[in-house]
Amino acid sequence: MSKPRRVDDALYVHFITFSCYHRRRLLDHDQPKRILLGVLNEELQKFEARCVGFVIMPDHVHALIWFSKTGQLSQFMQQWKGRSSKGTKEFLYRTMPEYTSKFPKTDPIWQVRFYSFEIYTTAKIEEKLNYMHMNPVRAGLVQMPTEWRWSSARWYIEGRTVGIPIQWLD
């Protein structure tokens, strides 16, 4: 399998997608989502990055991330996925032994790779935000994007906090 092409040579907004291993619904419970957001917040601070938007679905994650320096995407993703994987795995095995007994303990939480799409325009950022925020609605999880606690929709539509700082680019 060929290595995915990564573009990280300018200050783009990266539209990032990554999935749970075998598309398992490992993010159905609130605690894994909290772990994921907590690690994201810490990594944003470490990398001096901005989160423009996000959504956490039961089996995958989308985020719009901007870095203040080039060449940080892969290391950021390695840290975000690696640290959140550890906390999520501990939670799942401690609290859901019946569910986790269905697959080997050596299975990872996340698929190995992630997808990144570099965005150059405000219009494309807005398109991706709409796409992300409508994801829970399309999946039948809620009727309106603001009803889904695990996205930046409430910040954009209602001005409410969403667990991490959301920052539009100037």
Image (cartoon, rainbow, N blue to C red):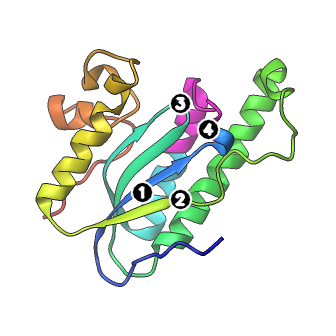
Tag 3: residue type? Pro
Q: Would you say residue 138 sits in the magenta stretch?
A: no
What whole-number distance in Å separates the C-alpha atoms at marks 4 and 2? 13 Å
Answer yes or no: is residue 168 visible. Answer: no
Secondary structure beneath label 4: helix
What whole-number distance in Å separates the C-alpha atoms at marks 1 and 4? 16 Å
What whole-number distance in Å separates the C-alpha atoms at marks 1 and 2? 7 Å
How packed is label 2: few (under 14 Cα within 10 Å), some, or many (20 or more)? some
- Give the residue displayed 80% in from the left and 45% down from the top: 107
Q: Position of residue 155 (x, y in %)?
A: 23, 36
In the rendered view, tell whether residue 124 sits above or below residue 10: above
The residue where tag 1 is placed is 16
The mark nearer the N terminus, 1 or 3, is: 1
Labels 1 & 2 near each other (Cβ < 8 A): yes
Range drawn in magenta: 23-37
Which numbered marker is on residue 23? Answer: 4
Which numbered marker is on residue 58? Answer: 3
In the rendered view, tell whether residue 146 sits above or below residue 125: above
Q: Would you say residue 30 sits in the magenta stretch?
A: yes
Majority secondary structure in the magenta region: helix
Labels 1 & 3 near each other (Cβ < 8 A): no
Secondary structure beneath label 3: loop
Q: Position of residue 150 (x, y in %)?
A: 41, 31
The residue where tag 2 is placed is 114
Residue 87 in the figure: left or right of residue 57: right
- Give the residue displayed 58% in from the left and 39% down from the top: 35
